[in-house]
Amino acid sequence: MASTTVPALDAHRLRADFAVFEELIGGRPVAYLDSASSTQKPRQVLDRMRTFYEHEYANVHRGVYRLSERATEGFEAARRTVAGLLNAPSEREVVFTRSATEAINLIAYAWGLDNLGPGDVVVITELEHHANFVPWQYIAQRTGASFRHIPIDDHGELQLDALDGLAREGRIKVVANNLVSNTLGTINPVETLAAWAHDQGAIMVVDAAQAAPHRVVDVQALGADFVAISSHKLCGPSGVGALWGRREILEAMSPFNLGGEMIRSVGLDRTTFNELPHKFEAGTPAIAEAVGFGAAIDYVTDIGLEAIERHEHALVEQAMTALEEIPWIRVFGPPVDRRAGIVSFDVEGIHPHDVAQILDWEGVAVRAGHHCTQPLMTRLGVAATTRASFYLYSIPEEIDRLVAGLHKVKASLG
Amino acid sequence: MSEFEQLYREVILDHYKAPRNHGVLEPHDAIAEGQNPLCGDEVTVSVRFGDGDVIEDVGFEGRGCAISQAATSMLTDLVKGRTAAEVSAMPKDELLDEIGIPLTPVRLKCALLGLGVLKVALHKAKGTPLPEEWGTSAGEITLS
C-alpha cells in the first residue's frame, strides 16, 4: 500500500478530462466499470495525437527532411517515456509492439523457438490471461518442451509450494506470470517467482498489462527479464504496446517480424539485422499511437501511480464490502489488501451475460465472460463471471449504481 | 414495454426456467458439444433418429445465459419430426423468428449456439452439411 503522505487524487475533477463521461446513453451517463478491459481516453492524449498529426507527422527513421526528424523525435521521446515508466536501464531495451499480446508472442517465438526443446519446462500459472498462456502452450508444442502450471488456492493466490515439484520435472527454462490478474485482481509475488526462475536458470516473463496502469512497475526491482505492457489499458490509444527486455537477452535473440527498418543491410545472399530496439520493429510502427501512449504515461504519472493505487484500493474496498453483504453474491479472489482494483463475482443462479445485460439498462457497464482466462474459470468451477474494474476516474457513486443494479437483476431474474 | 420485457419476454423466461427436452438422451444416435468462444458457454445436443433420418427425439444440456438456454430449448421443440437434411438446411431466421426479440450481435451468438451444435451432431451422424459459420477446425494445440 502507498504511504499516507501520497496526496489523494480527485476523481470528480479528473473526469472533466474525459469527454465520454458527458455522453448520455439511455438518458444518463455510463457508470464505466470495465477499465480492466480498456480505459477511457483523456483530452490530453487525444490533443497530443492531433497535434502530432497536424504539425509533426511523417514516417520515422527514414527521411532526411525536418518533418521526419520531428516525427522521429516524437516517437523516440515516447520510447524514453516508456523506459522511464518501467525504470528500464536503457530505452534501447524498449521495443514498441502492437500490443502486450504481441510483445509476449515476440518472446515466445523469437526466444522460445531457439531456446526450448524436449526436457525443458515452460511454467505458467493457472490465472494467466490467454495472452501469456496460449503462446507458451503453442511454442511448447512446437519445440517438444513441457508445459506446466503453478496452481492457485481457493482465494486465487499462487501456491508457491508447488515450485519444488515443478523443478523436478525437467530444466525450467521460462516462468511466465502476470503481475496482476485481470480476472481476480490478485497481485502476484513476481519478485519471488523471478528469483526462483533465475535459480533454475530460467527467464522470467512478466505480463504487466494489468499492473502498469495502476501501480508502480519497476523492471529492475521485479528482477524480470521481460515485461509486456499495453497502451490502451493506460489511457492511451489501442494498437500499440511495449516490450521491455534485458539487453543481453535481446541482443542474442533472433528477430521476430522481418522486413524494413529491422535490417542493417540486405543483399541477395545475406541480410544483417539492425541494432536494438529496431531489430524488433519491422515495418512502419504505430507512430502517432506511440506518441499518444507517451502522452498517456505523462498524464498518469503526473497524477501519480501511488495516488491511483490508493484511490482504486478505496474503491475496491467499498465494492467488496458492499458485495460481500449480499447473500446471493459470491466474490472470487483474494482479500482486499492483496488485490488491485478488480472484483469478479457470481450472482447466484443468474448467468453473467444476463447480469451484464440488465446492468447495462441501468447504465452500468461491466464485463461478463471468461475474461480470456478459461483455465482459471475451470479452476473456479464456473463458465464465466461478472467483473467490475476501476481506474483513476472511477467514483464511489458508480459502485452504488452497480449494487443497486444488482438488486434489480435479482428482482428480475432471481 | 420495458427493455427487460422486450428481451426477456415471458416465453423466453419460461423456456429458461423450465427447459424442454433437457438432458442427454441415452442411448443416442448423434451427439455434439460446442462452446461460445466469447463467454465460454457450453451446450451438448443429442439426437435419436426414428425412421431413416427423421429426428424422433432430441435432448440438450448446457450452461449459459437465459438467451442461449431458452433458444436451445425452443429449438428442440422445433426440430422433432423433421429429417436431418431439413434441419441442416434450416435457416437461422426460423429460430430467430421463434425467439421473436431483437438481438445484438453478441446475443445473437448466444441464441444460435444450440442450432450450430445440433447441425454438427447431424453432420457427424448423417453427413449433412456443417453450418457455414462453423466450418472445419482451424487446428489445435495438443500437448502430449
Image: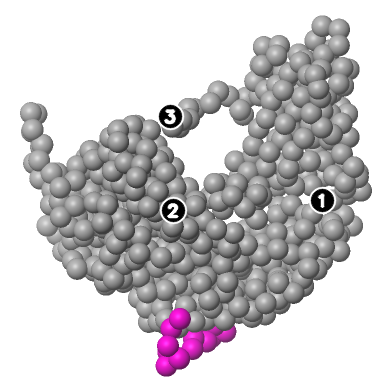
Q: Is residue B117 magenta?
A: no
Q: Position of residue A287 (x, y in %)?
A: 30, 58
Q: Which element is circle 1 on?
A: helix
> Are the residues flagged by discs 2 and 3 in contact, CB closer than 8 Å?
no
Residues drawn in magenta = A1-19
Q: Is A249 left, or right, of B3 in this rendering?
A: left
**Which disc is residue A162 wearing?**
2
Q: Which residue is mark 1?
A: B7
Q: Are marks 1 and 3 on the same chain?
A: yes
Q: Is residue A14 magenta?
A: yes
Quarter holding residue A94 = bottom left
Could you tell me the amino acid type at mark 2?
Ala
Colour scheme shown: one colour
Frontmost residue, A213 versus A238: A213
Residue at image x 37%, y 78%? Answer: A301
Report, in whole angstroms, how far the alpha carbon at label 1 lies from the one at label 3. Answer: 45 Å
Frontmost residue, A162 versus B98: A162
**Which disc is residue B144 wearing?**
3
Q: Which element is circle 2 on?
A: helix
Report, in whole angstroms, how far the alpha carbon at label 2 lies from the one at label 3. Answer: 21 Å
